[in-house]
């Protein structure tokens, strides 16, 4: 019997097909009738999620490239794209496939889509093929998370998908233009512990506004996205500020008595909003923050209007690098906002990624999905530089050229929990001449080291890609490693639940309520005490039901 959520998807598809086009998609039949090639190789029709900037060499495509060719050669298969699309267009294609029941042999889906597929008996049970075919390394990788990702993909004792993982990535960092600090002779973090206070951040923002080191003529202090907070260590949000007050917006938290609370309704979040209201009135916060998009904030940064950004360790790779393109002198340093006890309050991180590989029910070779996981996240991931050039020469060239991971058959991440910290220590060992670069097995880390060394030797003339590698891998990873070694993190127990009935029905309205009320409080359209009204409304408009449903689900998991 079809579930309610599946019916909703059908209705959504009808509306989407009436109002939008899938012109961006390359649509193919998901089942052309062939299961093997003329020489007996299994054919795998894949639903392919593509990227906007794959950087593929001329002549290569998402269906035919170094990654697909090595998979075909090693696994003795032929890969065909049942459909390929990017972003929302891919989501529509997946929804259409689920609604029609006409699935490709394999594809990547979200948590919600996985549940629908399971409820409607459309995908293969992978329990046996995983146990029989997964490499020891892959099994050990999941074990670093206490096998939680596998549990999240398990329904009634059956493993129904191959889950992605979320390596340790805390905290949200405060990235500040180091060249501007030097130019203005601003001294913060005098003890070198990489921790700063809210007062120090305020001091820096005021100085940047008063002195306009970017010569923009219209400087801005601290920019924020219009949605203000996020459920992860996202960019341009208030999460790190709220964490100073032990507020954790957008997080469901497990209290000592086992009850569930919502971080956006906590007293700590109210204190953070009060501070931000003060900052807004003083002109420290971007006066247009309520309407700013990500692209708007990137424009502020690249135009030299602001030199402060909050974001994860990897923001230099895809965000701050745009600033270097405009200003060759731009350099950033990363800090963590600490509370009065010198601790960085962070929620326990979810261990399971947002994507899952599923196999169509009835497909004759489900083991090939596990074998691909072994190939890309064990064999290739753990190959030394010399062996990479000999065994996977085309892949080695891709890594050198910076070809995007979206060109792999499945753009999913399966890495050990501590992978970034381990990689940072390997990088430092090479830079300190304690290890040869050839000894590092992770090919992407090897490639990063070359860029890092080039940047440290000649920072002014190094290309932006090397600048990015240095800032994300040395500055970003370095801060994570330092805080971990010095035990600066105060971990808050968090509850990660895929979805609940009330989340599906009322979640969008509750999110809108939160975003609008927080903006009203910060801008002064409502007094700070209006937060208490928001809390009451959130609970009464569905929040209480969500908390009860999460608590019930966690109880059932015990």
Image (tube, rainbow, N blue to C red):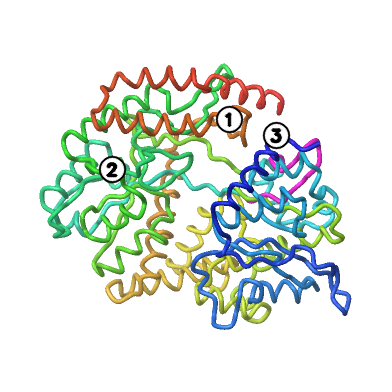
* Residue at 24% from the left image edge and 56% from the top image edge: 178
Give the answer, above or below, for where 247 lies relative to 20: above
Q: Which mark is residue 505?
A: 1
Q: Position of residue 234 (x, y in %)?
A: 43, 46
Question: Which residue has dot 2 on it?
Answer: 289
Q: Name the image quarter holding residue 282.
A: top left
Secondary element type, mark 3? helix
How far apart, in angstroms, are the residues tagged by discs 1 and 2?
29 Å
Magenta highlight range: 151-164
Q: Position of residue 41 (x, y in %)?
A: 84, 73
- First of labels 3, 2 by sequence position: 3
Q: Position of residue 512 (x, y in %)?
A: 43, 33
Q: Residues within 10 Å of mark 1 (few under 14, many from 20)?
A: few
* Residue at 53% from the left image edge and 72% from the top image edge: 403
* Residue at 30% from the left image edge and 63% from the top image edge: 323
Q: Residues within 10 Å of mark 2 (few under 14, many from 20)?
A: many
Question: Which residue has dot 3 on it?
Answer: 4
């Amino acid at each position: 019997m079809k579930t309610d959520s599946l019916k909703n998807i059908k209705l959504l598809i009808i509306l989407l097909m009436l109002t939008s086009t899938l012109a961006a998609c390359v649509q193919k039949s998901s089942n052309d009738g062939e299961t093997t090639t003329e020489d007996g190789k299994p054919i795998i029709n894949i639903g392919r999620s593509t990227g906007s900037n794959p950087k593929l060499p001329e002549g290569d495509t998402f269906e035919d490239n170094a990654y697909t060719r090595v998979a075909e050669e090693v696994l003795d298969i032929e890969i065909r794209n049942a459909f390929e699309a990017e972003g929302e267009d891919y989501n529509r294609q997946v929804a259409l496939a689920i609604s029609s029941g006409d699935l490709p042999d394999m594809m990547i889906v979200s948590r919600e889509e996985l549940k629908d597929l399971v409820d409607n008996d459309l995908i293969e049970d992978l329990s046996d093929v995983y146990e029989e075919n997964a490499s020891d390394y892959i099994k050990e990788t999941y074990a670093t998370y206490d096998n939680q990702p596998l549990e999240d993909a398990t329904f009634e004792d059956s493993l129904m998908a191959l889950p992605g993982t979320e390596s340790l990535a805390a905290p949200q960092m405060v990235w500040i233009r180091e060249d501007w600090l030097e130019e203005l002779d601003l001294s913060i973090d005098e003890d070198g512990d990489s921790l700063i206070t809210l007062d120090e951040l305020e001091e820096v923002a005021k100085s940047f506004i008063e002195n306009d080191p970017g010569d923009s003529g219209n400087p801005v202090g601290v920019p924020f996205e219009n949605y203000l907070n996020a459920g992860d260590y996202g960019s341009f949000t208030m999460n790190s500020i709220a964490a100073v007050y032990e507020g954790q917006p957008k997080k469901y938290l497990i209290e000592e008595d086992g009850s569930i609370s919502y971080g956006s309704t906590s007293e700590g979040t109210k204190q953070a909003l009060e501070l931000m209201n003060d900052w807004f009135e003083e002109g420290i916060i971007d006066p247009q923050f309520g309407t700013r998009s990500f692209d708007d904030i990137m424009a502020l940064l690249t135009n030299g209007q602001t030199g402060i950004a909050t974001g994860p360790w990897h923001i230099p790779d895809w965000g701050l690098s745009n600033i270097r393109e405009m200003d060759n002198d731009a350099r950033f340093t990363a800090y963590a906002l600490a509370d009065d006890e010198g601790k960085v309050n962070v929620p326990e991180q979810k261990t399971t990624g947002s994507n899952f590989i599923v196999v169509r029910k009835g497909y004759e070779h489900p083991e090939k999905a596990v074998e691909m996981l072994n190939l890309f996240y064990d064999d290739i991931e753990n190959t030394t530089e010399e062996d990479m050039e000999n065994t996977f020469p085309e892949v080695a060239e891709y890594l050198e050229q910076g070809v995007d991971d979206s060109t792999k058959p499945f753009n999913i991440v399966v890495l050990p929990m501590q992978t970034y910290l381990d990689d940072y220590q390997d990088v430092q060992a090479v830079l300190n001449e304690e290890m040869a670069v050839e000894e590092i097995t992770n090919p992407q880390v090897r490639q990063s080291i070359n860029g890092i060394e080039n940047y440290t030797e000649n920072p002014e003339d190094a290309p932006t890609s090397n600048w990015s590698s240095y800032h994300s891998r040395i500055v970003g990873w370095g801060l994570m490693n330092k805080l971990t070694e010095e035990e600066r993190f105060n971990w808050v127990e968090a509850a990660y639940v895929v979805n609940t009935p009330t989340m599906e029905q009322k979640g969008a309205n509750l999110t809108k309520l939160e975003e609008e009320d927080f903006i009203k409080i910060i801008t002064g359209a409502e007094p700070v005490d209006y937060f208490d009204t928001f809390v009451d409304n959130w609970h009464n408009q569905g929040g209480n039901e969500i908390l009860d449903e999460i608590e019930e689900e966690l109880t059932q998991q015990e």
